[in-house]
Image (cartoon, rainbow, N blue to C red):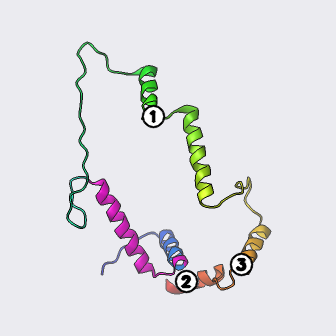
Amino acid sequence: MKAIYISDELHRWAKVRATETGISLKNLIEQWVEQGLRVAAIRTPGQLNKVGEPMLTYELQAHPIAADTAPPHGEGFMDEMERRGLLIRGERLREQFQAEYLALRKILGISTPPPAEPPSIEEVRASFRHQRELHPEAPTVTELLIQMREEE
């Protein structure tokens, strides 16, 4: 067993997440570390994964450029990169980000546009009351904070 020191804010976030998922903080952090190590192993070619199989590696081939040919640059090169799908620029990039943002909102079930201004304290309290009515068995924010303070 080893001690690892993290910021207080990160520790609080992890404790809240552990409470939300219903597992211990220790188990949650162990899961996160294991997942992170798996991702790091995938991104590190030439190493072995957990079962001893070699990781995927990629071979790149370079093609020589004729001596009398100038290296590609300028708008023509950028247009060719965009045509091949290797580059997205300008308004198309903005459109792609917007489409991905809207798709993510749809996946998460968010159907209302984000408010232009933060909600008032009355709106926040009404939201908490509504959630309490929907899920009376769930702990309140106050109960979660008390539990977190007791665990510290």
Determine the residue positioned at 59% across, 84% down.
Answer: 146
Which residue type carries mark 2? Arg
Q: What distance separates the C-alpha of mark 3 from that of mark 1?
A: 47 Å
Picture coordinates of residue 143, whole percent (x, y) = 63, 84
The residue wearing badge 3 is 134
The residue wearing badge 2 is 149
Asked if residue 128 is positioned above or below residue 63 in the image, the reply reads below
Q: Is residue 131 magenta?
A: no
Q: What distance separates the C-alpha of mark 1 from that of mark 2?
A: 49 Å
Asked if residue 141 is positioned above or below residue 63 in the image, the reply reads below
* Quadrant of residue 128 within the rendered picture: bottom right
* Residues in magenta, as a range: 20-44
User: Which secondary structure, mark 1?
Assistant: loop
User: Which secondary structure, mark 2?
Assistant: helix
Instruction: Specify whether 19 is left or right of 133.
Output: left
Asked if residue 104 is positioned above or below residue 147 in the image, the reply reads above
* Badge 3: residue crowd in 10 Å (few <14, some 14–19, many ≥20): few
User: Which secondary structure, mark 3?
Assistant: helix
- Of mark 1 and mark 2, the one earlier in the sequence is 1
Picture coordinates of residue 11, whole percent (x, y) = 47, 73
Determine the residue positioned at 54% across, 37% down.
Answer: 93
Query: Foreground: 57 or 94?
Result: 57
Picture coordinates of residue 129, whole percent (x, y) = 75, 77
State if disc 2 and disc 1 touch (CB < 8 Å): no
Which residue type carries mark 3? Leu
Determine the residue positioned at 79% across, 70% down.
Answer: 122
* Badge 1: residue crowd in 10 Å (few <14, some 14–19, many ≥20): few
User: Main SS type for the magenta part?
Assistant: helix
The residue wearing badge 1 is 87
Which residue type carries mark 1? Leu
Determine the residue positioned at 36% across, 21% down.
Answer: 72
